[in-house]
Structures are given as C-alpha cells and as structure tokens.
Amino acid sequence: MYFDIQRFSTHDGDGIRSILFLKGCSLACPWCQNPESRSEKRSLLFDQRLCLQDCQACQKETNTITRNKEGLIVIDRLAIDEKVLDSLTQCCPTQALSVCGKETQQDILFETLLKDKAFYIQSGGGVTFSGGEPLMQPELVENIAKRMHQQGINTAIETCMHVPWKNIERVLPYIDCWLTDLKHTDQQKFQEWAKGSLSRIQKNFQQLALHAKRIVIRIPIVPGFNDTEQELHAIIDFAVSLKACCELHLLPYHTLGINKYDLLDMPYHCADKPLDNPVLLINAQEYAQNHPQSVQKLTVTIRG
Ligand code: SF4
Ligand code: SF4
C-alpha cells in the first residue's frame, strides 16, 4: 500500500526524483513528522477548518460520523472499518475528510514513476522509496527498483533499518543509494522512545556496510532524546566505522508535521518547538568531519 507519489523532488537523493511513499512502519518515534504513514492500513484524516457547515455528505455515508450540538463533526474512529473508508474516499467536497493509503497494481505504480524518466536521466536523478518504512513491503520495492534499473534509472531508499535482514538483502542489488536513519546508540533509550530494537538496526547496518554501494546516514537530533554532545558523538562514532558510509546529514528536530496529529486524532508527545542549538550542530559537524577513525573522508551537512 502506498499513500503518495511526490514528483520533481530535489531533497531525497541526487537530481530530480519521484518519491514513492509506502504505508507502514515498525517503529513509533514520537517525533515522527509523517504519522499518517505509520499504520500499514489506511488512515482517516479530518481537518475541521475545511469542513462546510451545512454539508452532510459524510454523515449520509456512515453513522460513525455525526455532528454534535455545536455542529462540529465527531468521528467514532474505533467503529471505522474498511467498508466505511471505501465509502468516504470520494465523498468530501473540500478534502476536510481524506483517506490516506491506496492499493494499486505494481505495474501501474511502475508506469506512473517511469513517466518522468527523461527528467531523471537528464538531472542524474531517479526514484526514491520512502514511507513509513518502505522495507515493510520488500516485494514491491524489489519489483519496481529492479525494473527501474533495467531502464537505467537510479534508485534510492529512505529506511530506518528496523526490518528483518532478509527484507534488506532482497532489494540490495537494485538500490544505488541508502538514505538510512541512525537515531541513537543506547538500547534502552531507543526502546523507550522509538519502541524498537536498536541491536537489530545496528546488525543490519554492519551487514549493509559490507554490500551497499553508497550509504548516507541521517541523524535526527531530537530534544531530550539525543541532543547532547555525548550522545551525538556516540552516534557519529558508529556511523564513521561503517565502510560505504560517505555522507552524514544532521537533521535538527522540527515541528512541521505536528498538525497532522490533530488531523488523525493522535496525541503528540514530543517537543513543541524546533531544536534551537546551532552550537551543538556545528560542534557535531566538526567532530564528524575530523573524526580520526573515519574510514573515508565524510561529507557532513546540517539540513534545514
Ligand atoms: S463531507 Fe467533508 S465538508 Fe462535508 S460534512 Fe463531511 S467532512 Fe465536512
Ligand atoms: S522510523 Fe520514520 S516513519 Fe517510522 S515512526 Fe520513526 S520517524 Fe516515523
């Protein structure tokens, strides 16, 4: 299942790219700015600001959506099933109500992505798989990435690496660039915050480093989670030890996705302000650039 295709992107890999966003993730990072991507099933988003006061279209489709005395929409989310989601997919005239997630044949996805082939080739770009965690759907990634390679198109993947190694191994021959997250080195803290196994991720990194053509490691820097010099140094130490890691991106925490939690009726448990610590970022950049154990000279950038 996928939830979006973003064309003409210049952020997630080299050149001009199309990003295929797949549903489902096995982690639960509280800072996640794509919460609509986390469930492997479809998700319902509702934006009160776009709702028309006199409209009853969604209430006619299902009794799981009603209006309260104040005229505001109330959604019984626990009662929403696949059939209700089907009925709501096309019903809202303003997109106040929207269903995130679509099942489509892989052939159709491939043909859609292939439409921009000329731009990919001309710009040195290609196709990037993102999410959620795209490697929750390795068969889909393998199929499309393999066919992109047959067309001479570059492929990249954004992954948190929290998947069985066999999922990574399956797509390895068809991925040119691995844009991977490395969030912490402390097992317990990682488990507490992201609800996953850090040792699984670290073992995957060690294996991947032996086989991948190119690894870019991205470190989200999150207040209260890993925003100390000591924690960042430990993460960077791990990153530089990996063969094939040629680039490091430092990603200061931002809050651009907070609104989506409201739309999904989910609580948000992370800082409500962006990270504001330029000294920490610059020091981390210098530490990584001049790291004595670095296998190769790293390009280290601070991303906005
Ligand atoms: S269909 Fe859309 S605009 Fe109409 S009541 Fe429902 S949410 Fe509001
Ligand atoms: S790994 Fe990425 S998509 Fe998954 S919960 Fe964390 S930030 Fe969100």
Image (cartoon, rainbow, N blue to C red):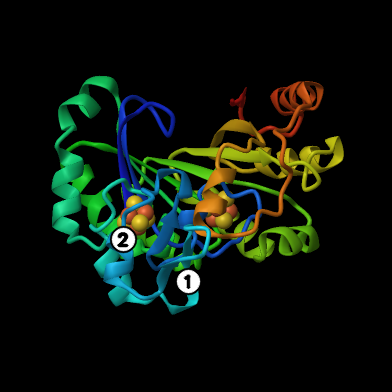
Q: Is mark 2 within 8 Å of ligand 1?
A: yes
Left or right for 89, reference 183: left
Give the residue pinned by disc 1.
Answer: 77
User: Where 218 falls versus 282 (above or below)?
Assistant: below
Does residue 178 appear anywhere in the picture? yes
Give the residue pinned by disc 2.
Answer: 56
88 or 52: nearer the viewer:
52
User: Where 176 falls versus 198 (above or below)?
Assistant: above
Task: Residue 171: give x, y in percent of width and height.
Answer: 35, 56
Q: For residue 81, what is the image quadrant?
A: bottom left
51 or 182: nearer the viewer:
51
Task: Residue 70: give x, y in percent of width and height.
Answer: 52, 58
Task: Name the secondary structure under disc 2.
Answer: loop
For the C terminus, the quadrant is top right
Task: Residue 227: give x, y in percent of width and height.
Answer: 79, 39
Task: Residue 176: give x, y in percent of width and height.
Answer: 37, 40
Q: Amino acid at mark 2?
A: Gln
186 or 104: nearer the viewer:
104
Q: Amino acid at mark 1?
A: Arg
